[in-house]
Image (cartoon, rainbow, N blue to C red):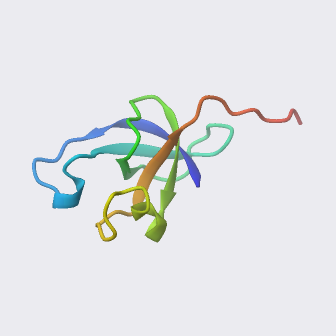
Amino acid sequence: MFFGSVLGTVWATQKDEHLKSFKLQLLQPINARRENLGAPIVAVDTIGAGVGETVFYITAREAVIPLPVEMSPVDASIVGIVDRIDLQAE
């Protein structure tokens, strides 16, 4: 799993039949210190995350697991909203 920050919602007038009940969110991958890591990605929102929230997401083949179908064209899925990240002081 990875941390991400929701930048916004992607609106699609047409999308795969299996994804019609899900929002697509634009995510900025981040580390535990909330520093940006790489370019933003699009992820299927399976939990109802909102803009500005920190989330955790899964990628690759496992991204389909939270969906109610076995096969769907998904590379990333949001699976949780982060309430807090506690880091030990250096």
Q: Residue at x 39, y 30 (%)?
A: 51
Q: Position of residue 12 (x, y in %)?
A: 16, 47
Q: Residue at x 45, y 28 (%)?
A: 52
Please indicate, yes or no, whether residue 21 appears anywhere in the rendered image: yes
Residue toward you, 73 or 11? 73
Residue 8 left/right relative to 36 = left
> Among all residues in the image, which is located at the extreme left?
13
What is the total number of numbered labels drawn onto the structure image?
A: 0
Residue toward you, 77 or 10? 77
Q: Quadrant of the C terminus?
A: top right
> Among all residues in the image, which is located at the extreme front?
68
Q: Taking 12 as reference, is 6 above or below it?
A: above
Residue 10 left/right relative to 51 = left
Q: Position of residue 54 (x, y in %)?
A: 53, 35
Residue 36 left/right relative to 25 = right
> Among all residues in the image, which is located at the extreme right?
90
Please indicate, yes or no, whether residue 16 appears anywhere in the rendered image: no
> For residue 64, which quarter of the picture?
bottom left
Q: Position of residue 77 (x, y in %)?
A: 42, 53
Q: Residue at x 85, y 35 (%)?
A: 88
Q: Position of residue 60 (x, y in %)?
A: 46, 68
Residue 1 left/right relative to 48 = right
Residue toward you, 28 or 76? 76
Q: Quadrant of the N terminus?
A: bottom right
Q: Residue at x 60, y 29 (%)?
A: 83
> For residue 87, which quarter of the picture?
top right
